[in-house]
Amino acid sequence: MSRKLARSQAFQTLFQLETKNSELTIDEAIRFIKEDDPDLDFDFIHWLVSGVKDHEAVLDATISPHLKGWTIPRLLKTDRIILRMATFEIIHSDTPKKVIMNEAIELAKQYSDDDHYRFINGVLSNINKD
């Protein structure tokens, strides 16, 4: 299965885990996906979701200087999750940065407000320069 679909499922899992009433563990949240689509790359999904959750403070510290007038808590939950996912992948994977950025933009187009993909692109471009 494609990494694109795996990233989308990782996004949905992280979104679910950030819901205030969620008491699920990462493994429990991923188990729900496995029941629906057992062909996904669950090792990648688990790596990405766990990495974002385990490194959240470092990711936020990396993202924050590039927000220009915004703070992490003020961001839409969708934008915050997409930025964290992409930043984690940029820092911790060998995937080309351009691919990671394009995937993040596609996630923003699918899950965020109309033009927020431009904001995501700008922030990630600045992170890439560092």
Image (cartoon, helix red, strand yellow):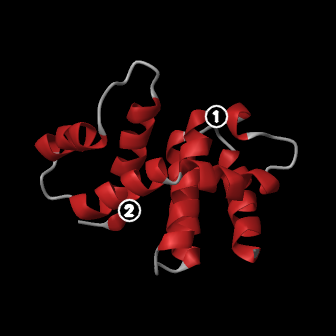
Report helix, strand or loop for mark 1. Answer: loop
In screen coordinates, is 22 left or right of 74? left
From the viewer's side, name the closer residue of 20 and 38: 20
Of the two numbered discs 2 and 1 in the rendering, the one whose residue sits closer to the viewer: 1
For the question of whether residue 96 can be seen, the reply is yes
Task: Say whether residue 105 is left or right of residue 71.
Answer: left
Look at the picture and state if 96 lies above or below 2: below
Q: Which residue is mark 1?
A: 76
Q: Residue at x 44, y 36 (%)?
A: 15
What label sits on residue 4 in the rendered view?
2
Q: Amino acid at mark 1?
A: Leu
Q: Residue at x 15, y 42 (%)?
A: 36
Q: Quadrant of residue 101?
A: bottom right
Side (left or right) of 38 relative to 23: left
Please state which of residues 44 and 57 is positioned toward the viewer in this rendering. 57
Crowding around mark 2 (Cα neighbors within 10 Å: few <14, some 14 to 19, many 20+) is some
The amino acid pointed to by label 2 is Lys
Residue 28, image x and y in percent?
A: 22, 37
For the question of whether residue 41 can be seen, the reply is no
Whole-percent x and y of residue 57? 60, 49
Residue at the right extreme of this rendering: 69
Marks 2 and 1 close (CB-CB < 8 Å): no
Question: Which quadrant would the N terminus be assigned to in this image?
Answer: bottom left
- Mark 1 neighbour density, 10 Å: few (under 14) some (14–19) many (20 or more): few
Q: What residue sits 30% from the left and 42% below the top?
A: 26
Secondary structure found at label 2: helix
Relative to 77, residue 40 above or below: below
CA gap between label 2 and label 1 equals 22 Å
Which is more toward the observer, 25 or 13? 25
